[in-house]
Amino acid sequence: MDTTYNRLRLNIGLIICLLSVHAAAQNNTALVFTHAGIISMTKEEVLRDYSVVVRDGKITEVGPSATVTLPPGATVIDATGKFLIPALSDMHVHVEGDAWNIMYPKEKQFSRNEIRFEDILFLYIAYGITTVNIMSALHEHIPLRENIEQNKLIAPRLVLSRMIDGAGKAWPPPISTWVTGADEAKKAVLEMHHHGYDMVKVYSFLDKISYDTIIATARSLSMPVVGHIPLSTSPEYVVAAGQKMIAHSEEVMKFAKQYNAAEVDHYASLFAASDTWVTTTLILHRNLNALLRNSDEELTKPGTEYLHPMATGIWNYIYQNLYKPIPTKNREALIDGYKNFQRPFVYELNKRGGKLLIGTDALIPSTLPGISLHEELKELVDAGLTPFEALKIATTNTFDFLGERDRAGTIEQGMAANLLLLEKNPLEDITSTRTILGVMTQNRWISKKDIEIRLTTIRESYATIRKR
């Protein structure tokens, strides 16, 4: 197994090198998309027969093709009849790592050589996602983030949110940090800041004094607080405290007295009037309901062949220990809440101008890295949003949230060149975001063919690990 696996690793390394040939601006070479339909996300329109010039990872010119002069030696992508949009984001994911080995007996744990982040994270690139927020970030993700920033591997930008929770209730260390009381809470946040995490993620079982201490300490360090609404608090409490983001629409739902229009109206009004963002994660709950109906089908659905074997085990562990025991009455309540609170709440919050982010909770069963983001876009449209509104949540809103809208999230001169070329127009049909012809990121053009070759290699390498 080791010899075969190492050979596959070498093949992956070769493909990475080949992809590096597509670095558009090495030696200051420009890349130009010509004759495209541009959906810039500055307004709801398609700019027909436009060209976009990219150099050094930035958009240097956008204009009608007839007015754009091709720089000497430029790489040209003929986008006639195609559609160019900003690349997508997923603001709620989880990523495998050594810490997740706690779900496995020692003899079945995965070595660090088997947990290849360049494979795990490439699934996001393959589906046009160039920014992700890891909502249970681990220490090993910190140097990984730096390597990505230095373009040492092809992967999405990582925002790292470290999870903190009350002791003894949910995800154990080292997946999260457990605290009891103000002193431990303050120490934990200071350590997170020292290690270089971007945000603090609060979880459900924090006591109120720990939560208050986390908020105060993080504010003194200019670290945003994101995550759940602790059961010791309330939606009103965390909004007043200044929590920057709620990680699920479900987090609001669990405080609703009933799943009806009056409760939706109350909470949509509360959040629309606040500066607190809400991450949608509707697909997570649609998938959960499907998993409870037919676990065999859902745990082996198309796309799972690209799921790291560690993640497959995590899915099975969570299903067997957390989901399968859910009583019938509670399962019916989950369906009711999804239909009659979560989806209407997201619709109403968007209608009232509330702050929405897109997220999937990938790694939680049966949500797949990458592809589930496109399913989430469809969930948003099915909930009543227009395709443009859904795309805005998946593109420009990310950078509003991060405070970076002046340099990313739209197709304009001076913006970061994270771009997605599509065969079909997503403003007409949101499922057209899946018609990917290529991705521009990290100053590289990665074509559909490149993506397919890489995914085949990843699938084969995972099949080898599964045999072990």
Image (cartoon, grey):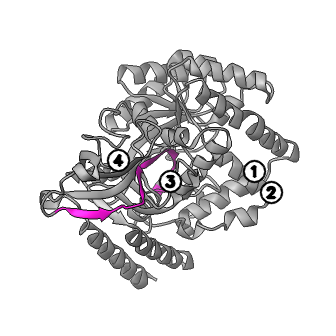
- Would you name the residue on which mark 2 appears? 293
Say few, some or many: other residues with alpha carbon within 10 Å of mark 3 (under 14 / 14 to 19 / 20 or more). many
Q: Secondary structure at mark 2?
A: helix
Identify the residue shown where x is 55% and y is 15%.
240
Percent across and percent down for residue 214 are 48, 24
Say few, some or many: other residues with alpha carbon within 10 Å of mark 1 (under 14 / 14 to 19 / 20 or more). some
Earlier sequence position, callout 3 versus callout 2: 2
Q: CA distance from mark 2 to mark 1?
A: 6 Å
**Is residue 366 among the parts visible in the rendering?**
yes
Q: CA distance from mark 4 to mark 3?
A: 37 Å
Percent across and percent down for residue 379 are 64, 46
Specify whether 307 is left or right of 232.
left
Vertical arrangement, residue 130 with respect to residue 222, above or below:
below
Amino acid type, residue under disc 1 in the picture:
Asn
Q: CA distance from mark 3 to mark 2?
A: 34 Å
Amino acid type, residue under disc 3 in the picture:
Asn
- Would you name the residue on which mark 4 appears? 142
Q: Residue furthest front?
A: 66
Earlier sequence position, callout 3 versus callout 1: 1
Percent across and percent down for residue 260 are 80, 28
Q: Mark 2 near mark 1, Cβ–Cβ under 8 Å?
A: yes
Q: CA distance from mark 3 to mark 1?
A: 31 Å
Amino acid type, residue under disc 2 in the picture:
Arg
Identify the residue shown where x is 53% and y is 68%.
306
- Would you name the residue on which mark 3 appears? 425
Q: CA distance from mark 4 to mark 1?
A: 34 Å
Q: Secondary structure at mark 3?
A: loop
**Which label lies toward us, 4 or 1?**
1
Amino acid type, residue under disc 4 in the picture:
Ile
Q: Nearer the viewer, residue 330 or 342?
A: 342
